[in-house]
Amino acid sequence: MIGLDTNILVRYVTRDDERQWKRVDAYLEKHCSSKSPGWISCIVLCEFVWVLSRGYEYAKSDVSKLLEQLSHTIELRLESHDCVRGAIEDYKVGKADFSDYLIGRLNKERGCDTTVTLDRKASSHARFTLLPNA
């Protein structure tokens, strides 16, 4: 198994540099399979969403679709797959960032009762608690 960096996913999806896209595509075709999938960490997924949303101004619905496609691709394996899938669902309907929903899911999976935050958007979700005023 090989780990994939954010820039590999971004090049593959955006195709904004034809030469690099061809290199990425050829590498993934040769090295990622159902028997030996490419590994995508949670950090890479969060960066991927941030780059597409902020840098490339992709719509949230488009980013959500891409995340879903990645999560169903047998040539790729996502870290904490079930948490990622849940975070995708939360992100599609919520107001917070994908990374917030993933943090909440991962923390819950690790036994946390809640995740304390100062982020009002994240705190609207049941997995979060807005830090109270002193």
Image (cartoon, grey):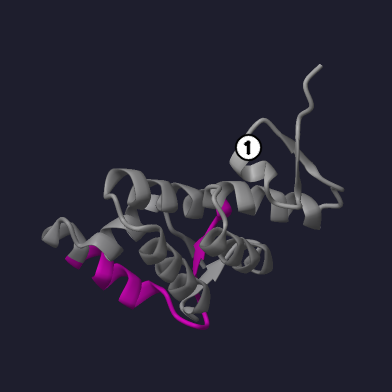
Task: Please tell me which residue is depicted at 79% across the width and 54% down the height of the picture.
Answer: 108
Task: Please tell me which residue is depicted at 48% across the width and 72% down the height of the picture.
Answer: 68
Neighbour class for label 1 at 10 Å: few (<14), some, many (≥20)? some
Position of 42 relative to 23 (above/below): above
Is 125 left, or right, of 99 in this rendering? right
Compare residues 63 and 46 and report the one nearer the observer: 63
Residue found farthest to the left: 18
Please name the amino acid that badge 1 sits on.
Answer: Arg
The range drawn in magenta is: 22-42
User: Residue 40: where, in percent of width, then height?
Assistant: 51, 60
User: Residue 129: where, in percent of width, then height?
Assistant: 77, 40
Compare residues 118 and 7 and report the one nearer the observer: 118
Q: Is residue 30 magenta?
A: yes
Classify mark 1: helix, strand or loop: helix
Is 30 left, or right, of 86 in this rendering? left
User: Residue 15: where, in percent of width, then height?
Assistant: 20, 62
Image quarter in which the C terminus is found: top right
User: Residue 80: where, in percent of width, then height?
Assistant: 66, 62
Which of the 4 image quarters holds residue 63? bottom left
Which of the 4 image quarters holds residue 130? top right
Task: Please tell me which residue is depicted at 44% across the width and 80% down the height of the picture.
Answer: 33
Which of the 4 image quarters holds residue 21? bottom left
Is 114 left, or right, of 7 in this rendering? right
Compare residues 76 and 3 and report the one nearer the observer: 76
Is 115 left, or right, of 71 in this rendering? right
Q: Is residue 45 magenta?
A: no
Task: Please tell me which residue is depicted at 30% across the width and 68% down the height of the picture.
Answer: 27
The residue that mark 1 highlights is: 120
Residue found farthest to the top: 134
